[in-house]
Amino acid sequence: MNDENTDSPSRRQARQNSVSTDLRIAGCGFAMGAADIVPGVSGGTVALILGVYERLIAAITRCDATFLKMLVGGQWRTAADYIDLRFLASLGFGIATGIGGLASLMNYLLTKQMSLTFATFTGMIIASSVIVARRIPKWNAQHAGLLLLGSVFALRLVTLSALQNPPDTLWYLFLCGMIGITAMILPGISGAFILLLLNRYHYITDSVIGLVHGDINLTVIVALFVFGLGCLTGLLSFSRVLRWLLSQYHDGTMAVLCGFMLGSLYKLWPFQRDVTPDIEKFKHKTFENFLPDPTTDHVWMAFILCVCGISAVISLDVIGRRAHAIRTAGDEA
């Protein structure tokens, strides 16, 4: 007998609702992936706006000893339900699709319109740092000192010659994945921005673009696999350390992060000259900052785009806080 004919209307409705939920979660993931590919916009912030942030963090933190015990005991279905695997798979598919869909555009903007693109990103990072700073209820001298410490450390970090030409090794790619994935745990921090600081943003986007366009080779597959493994390791390990810091030393941690973002703005200074014109590949080029003529149209356009970047991130934050307040009121009702 045909199974479709024996299905009750309630069972068919439940299955349709389940599929529609998967599609909705994948759509949320697509928006997160699109945000993650833009330095200055946090995928964590988008997850918060769309209402999947808490569920994502809960699923990640359940990858623990209990989960491993279920796997070893052959309780695969129970283990999958325990970590909300269906949700993670749908969200992960959406994120990968969003990243792949926008990687080419972002790569073009950074290579062909770097100055104006950096101006927009600068505005986004300034706004993001303000959002992070507002998470501290009451500032004091200690917080100001931690902010200054974070700024100095970041400024020193982004000016290191080692980061201008980082090692072209898999272990460094793994490390970038571990650090960059923290954007999912911290709304307001952009993972793409972190990769830009670590000078591996173009490498990753080039690899993704090649994969999307069918340029499949062992080097690209290995690079993305190692990077993905670093992301997974960061989620399962460093995310717990970060959550502990936020629970025990929330204000101090936020002050350091805010300072780190402000100090890193040196890397995004919109006006840079190419000091390696003989090098063809953009990801291997070196740039130096300079002060432009402030009366030129290009400078004014950069300023306008910087303001637009600030406005975009602030608007996202306002929408996110309102959506969170509505959901909280609904849960309490």
Image (cartoon, helix red, strand yellow):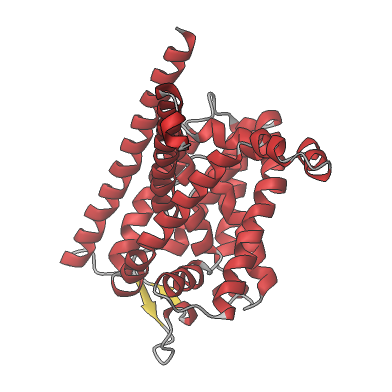
Residue 129 vs residue 61, the one in the foreground? 61
Q: State how many labels appear.
A: 0
Residue 12 vs residue 209, the one in the foreground? 12
Residue extending furthest front?
1
75 over 196 or under it: above or below: above
170 over 101 or under it: above or below: below
In the picture provided, is 107 more to the left or to the right than 247? left
Residue 80 position, x and y percent, is: 66, 39
Residue 202 position, x and y percent, is: 46, 71
- Tell me the quarter of the image containing the C terminus: top left
5 over 35 or under it: above or below: above
Tell me, yes or no, if residue 55 can be seen here.
yes
Q: Residue at x 46, y 29 (%)?
A: 6
In the picture provided, is 306 more to the left or to the right than 69? left
Tell me, yes or no, if residue 41 can be seen here.
no
In the picture provided, is 269 more to the left or to the right than 165? left
Residue 299 vs residue 195, the one in the foreground? 195
Residue 201 position, x and y percent, is: 49, 66
In the picture provided, is 254 more to the left or to the right than 28? right
Q: Quadrant of residue 58?
A: top right
Q: Residue at x 71, y 38 (%)?
A: 79
Residue extending furthest top?
333
Residue extending furthest bottom?
278
Q: Residue at x 56, y 37 (%)?
A: 56
